[in-house]
Amino acid sequence: MTNADGPASGVGATTPGGGASGRGATTPGGGASGEAPSDVFARRPKRADARRNYEKLLTAAREAFAEAGVSASLEDIARRAGVGIGTLYRHFPTRQDLFESVYIDEVEALCRTADDLAGQPPWDALAGWLRRFVTYTATKRAIAEALNHDSPVFATCRKAIDAAGQPLLSRAQKSGDARPDASFDDVLRLVGGVTMYPFADPAQLERVLTMALDGIRERPEG
Amino acid sequence: MTNADGPASGVGATTPGGGASGRGATTPGGGASGEAPSDVFARRPKRADARRNYEKLLTAAREAFAEAGVSASLEDIARRAGVGIGTLYRHFPTRQDLFESVYIDEVEALCRTADDLAGQPPWDALAGWLRRFVTYTATKRAIAEALNHDSPVFATCRKAIDAAGQPLLSRAQKSGDARPDASFDDVLRLVGGVTMYPFADPAQLERVLTMALDGIRERPEG
DNA sequence: CACCATACGGAGGGATGCCTCCGTTTGCAA
DNA sequence: TTGCAAACGGAGGCATCCCTCCGTATGGTG
């Protein structure tokens, strides 16, 4: 797995001292109980009903952000999830927390697919992962501009994506399939941009994606 | 001074007395003015102070949208422009009007560059125009998601862009420079996506743009 | 079963934004 | 210079959202 280590489980639990929104309370820093964090990101609640509501909120938030963008009303999200507004705030003290949690879910799924593709030939592995990356950006697009890019969560996720995808690119470059003068970040920008606007026609997505991949591919001869 | 003109033309002149934001319709029957309107979009006010404020508002709006996104406060925009909120509403009865006006400005500039490039070799002309297109999308990005895609203004702009760029692509395809299996819309999506996120490093923008253009280019061998 | 820590729901105060309305100012033509 | 239509500014009513607070409900354990 890509996660090298896992210091405290709650990467983005609550904003540290300096931050605004002086809540706190939830997920107290002192909860050093002996749980084995399965990954860096885990921070699900433990009681059954709480966990259920947590999931419902996450789903509702994903939908709401996709539909209404980053300015979706939190009260509407609570309504969609069928819980009270208070419950939303307990789980996600700030709007940022909600963004981050939705985002983290996506990143985890994306990183997992890199492992699944490890056995493929270099170019196929890279192309396959980039295809998966496109669906990731489609979800991310809605909340990207509001994600706090200085947040430690964001940095951690970015590192996880790099760790998952960078090897695939390097391998394809070593084998001569991918052009050598492209950085990993270049590639992500090119491919990620493809979903800037939603596609009505899946066939078109396929065509555009093919063009993007051709742009990444090494040209046959000079 | 000496503004020698004032043809009351325009796609969406100010809403008539009643109130509802019924757009369009204008299309003055006669076009009795002696001047040939250089484009379909013009709808500037005629009195000097009004025109001045109109421009100030447009500039302020462009800035505000770029910074704060589509949900920028209208009152803040009026403040930036140094005019009262009432003035803003007189010129732009709805938020959509403001979006559209900013957008139209950009489209006009983009279309003009197509003419400038007409004399270039096929591929150079296409590539040059697509480079300009990138800067257009950078501005558009902020307001794109809020633009009413059903608006007649949007449709008109889209047509104008097609009319400006499509010939460049066709020419490059006929000359064998651009791949034949790419529609104009495909190309715009690929290139436009490049600016999904702002670039800190101009050199990187150049690299990614090169990759995108390579994806559009016909591959050397068969 | 009984207890209590944990979680829940939603009313309500405060803040902000949207948009209208109207008294005042100003450009410009006679 | 004068008169008036056009444009201006901003107060204020209404709507919405954010977030807190606290009484109530419930899961899980002894």
Image (cartoon, coloured by chain):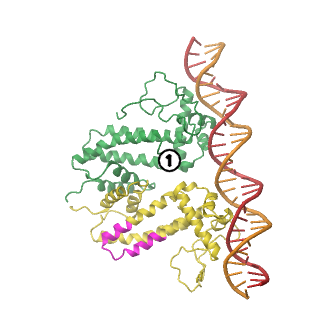
Chain colours: A green, B yellow, C orange, D red
Extreme-left residue of the structure = A221
Which residue: 53% across, 45% down?
A: A63
Identify the residue position indicated by label 1 in the image.
A143
Whether residue B151 appears in this view of the structure is no
From this view, report whether residue B121 is shown above or below residue A138. Answer: below
Query: In the image, residue B186 lies at what x, y percent?
Result: 38, 61
Q: Which residue is depicted at the point 57% across and 72% down?
A: B11
Q: Nearer the viewer, residue B46 or B218?
A: B46
Placement of A86 over or under A35, stated as above or below: below
Look at the magenta stretch and give its main secondary structure: helix
Q: Is residue A151 left or right of residue B9?
A: left
Q: Is residue B128 visible?
A: yes
Within the image, what quadrant is residue A74 found in? Answer: top right
Q: Is residue A143 magenta?
A: no
Estimate the x, y position of residue A117 in percent, counting from the top left: 30, 40
**In the foreground, A23 or B21:** A23
Give whichever of C17, B200 is nearer the camera.
B200
Chain hosting mark 1: A
**Which residues are the magenta region?**
B108-130
Q: Residues within 10 Å of mark 1 (few under 14, many from 20)?
A: many
Drawn side of residue D17 relative to residue A99, left or right = right
Quadrant in the picture for the C terminus of chain A: bottom left
Where residue A8 sits, quadrant-wise, is: top left
Q: In the rendered view, does A165 fall on the left or right side of D27?
A: left
Q: Which quadrant is home to the N terminus of chain A?
A: top left
Q: Is residue B203 above or below residue B18?
A: above
